[in-house]
Image (tube, coloured by chain):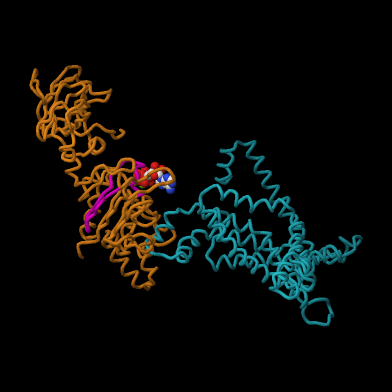
Amino acid sequence: MSAGVGVDLENLWIRFGDFVAVRDANVNINGGDFFSFLGPSGCGKTTILRAVSGFLDPSDGRVLIGGNDMKGIGPNKRPTALIFQNLALFPLMKVWENITFSMEIKGASAKERRKRADELLDMIALPGQGDKLPSELSGGQRQRVAIARALCAEPDVLLLDEPLSALDLKLRQHMRTELREIQKRVGITFIYITHDQGEALTMSDNIAVMRAGVIDQIGNGKAIYNDPATAFAASFVGENNVFRGKVKRMMGSEALIETNRSGDLVARISSANQGRLKEGDAAMMFIRPEAFALAPDGASGDHFVTARVNHEEFEGNTFNIFMEGEGGKELKVAIPNLGQSFEDHTGQSITLEYEAQNAVVVPAGELAAE
Amino acid sequence: MPRFLKEFFDRNGLGIGSLMLGLVLFWTIGLIILPQLSMLDFSFRPNLPPPEIGGPKDVYTMENYRYLVFGPEGGSQSYNAVDLKVFYRTLIAAIFVTIFNLILCYPIAYYLAQTKGNHIRIFALMLIIPYWINEILRAFALRIIFGETGVLNNLLVAAGIFDTPFDFVRNDIALYAGLGYAYILLMIFPIYNVIESLDRNQIEAARDMGASWPMIHRRVVIPYAKPGISSGCTMVFMLSAGALAAPQILGGPSSLWFTQLIYQQFNDNSDWPQGAAYAVVLLVTCILLVLALMRVFKVNMGDIGK
Ligand SMILES: Nc1ncnc2c1ncn2[C@@H]1O[C@H](COP(=O)(O)OP(=O)(O)OP(=O)(O)O)[C@@H](O)[C@H]1O
Ligand SMILES: [Mg+2]
């Protein structure tokens, strides 16, 4: 298979009446990539996918598939296949008929279809199940049938709308690996939609983080997790502790932040904001729970945080410390459990340290809802 | 006590449960089964003046049924060609009315079920409100439209499409239109009900895979709507075959409906046993026909109730 067919969104706007569901989206998806749109419920992910598959016309801007403008081309004429949030298998057709529906449309003989169905059933590890009805399969099996049905159409781009959300946790994790493997095997472009950051991080080559119709950041998993562009991206992807304040002094790629509660702290300026953040700007600083370490008592300086411990818990792989934080929100610290002894600090005031490169500062902005 | 009965009483309590059960039994047995059985009984008896009923001549006989097939004893023809022809034509016409109705109503039902918005409610109202008008008035209204000097003919002649008025009544077009119109709702609503529960994503999934609209209907919508379609078709067929008002008012002079023959037997000839026999034949034939067609189209009895 070739390098695959890319998808580009150029200044894409989608409005429903006065409501703007997608605001000026610009995304370049490389052919053969596993690309995820990650965002909370209602942020416009499905809307974007429907615009790519052709069920929805852009109010403004363009959708390009393989460099071709898709304007005026219906969903049945696009080289895409969509896997719906609820799968939408045909309940009255047998599994093999479901899988090969796209061939039936093109007039393939029953024998050909049967043969192709058997190949695909082998691929999705459901050999010999072709004569069942979808209702006779488990959730995970139905999931795989939906994937096979989409792949049977030999699309250049596979679109997946939260396909794992109906599955239980174990199966979901298993399907992540499986999806990724299938994608590598068939080599086509996958566009994946999810509100689960774990899914996005584990499977994707690149991720677009969305908030209320706006794309906040595009990058690979590491960049999104370690180097968020906005307060929303920092708070939505993974657990994070926020410190509000303003920029007191710029120090090259780092900045000293005058925080509201914890004194002056140093942090790295996220790459997207290098050169854009100025002294005096309102800012938010983020430090992940696992980036803290216990510091000797009495230590102080621009990379130490002192606060009272509300409570602690033991989670197996980590000791979690919950401390008084900003605005009623607790500061969470996770200390890896390496078999060391660990005393209970509840009620005491303790000091933590972190390394400046593990703290990141972005302009003040909207945080993700809990 | 069978389990479903016990569950029924557990759920509703003994008092309400017995009342409900009693009413349902009264409805089915008292108002439907017993009168029909008495009709069945009539159909096997000779037509006797009241003093002789219960007398020595009042014995079971096949005479009424024989009459439908072979006509009067010693008649000029070997078969009762007139009545049989009416019978056969009624069934064929009822089948055509049903098919015509289905073709007309399926798109309407699909549109109503798959479109969202307030105008749909107005559409539905516009379909329902004409049914507030009684059946006979509606039939006469159609006569006004289809009559030789009716609205339609005036328009067609004025527009120069026809030179002389076309006799819609004599050609049975008025009758078919009337019968079709009479049961539109009974066709639309069962289909509408089923299609409304069809997941829109299934239609979009088929479309996404490249299916054309006819293909989507053939492979996705119609199989799903089959219970509604069969239930609508059964009702329309049964009711058209058994209709009386529309054929009476809109039928051409030469085209009798079988129900009109039954009516004549009961009313004009005062021959209840003969009328009962004709009615039984019509009912049984219709049921057998429906069952046979259900077989052919692989519809279960349970689906009809959906
Ligand atoms: N046909 C429509 N008419 C009006 N508003 C719509 C329509 N479709 C979507 N919206 C609105 O657009 C916004 C984005 O919807 P969308 O379905 O894309 O969200 P989503 O990100 O997929 O959410 P979820 O994770 O819950 O599926 C929502 O606020 C929704 O109410
Ligand atoms: Mg969605």
Q: Residue A286 is drawn in which quadrant?
A: top left
Left or right, residue A153 beside residue B30: left
The region drawn magenta spans A25-47
Left or right, residue B11 beside residue B210: right
Residue reaching furthest to the right: B51
Q: Is residue B93 visible?
A: yes
Q: Is residue B3 magenta?
A: no
Query: Residue at the location (37% across, 73% down)?
Result: A109
Query: Front-most of A5 and A129?
Result: A5
Q: Is residue A44 magenta?
A: yes
Query: Residue at the location (22% across, 61% down)?
Result: A4
Residue B177 image point, x, y percent? 69, 65
Q: How many marks?
A: 0
Q: Quadrant of the C terminus of chain B?
A: bottom right
Chain A, chosen colour in render: orange
Left or right, residue B294 beside residue B158: left
On screen, A23 above or below A72?
Answer: above
Chain B, chosen colour in render: cyan
Q: Is residue B281 visible?
A: no
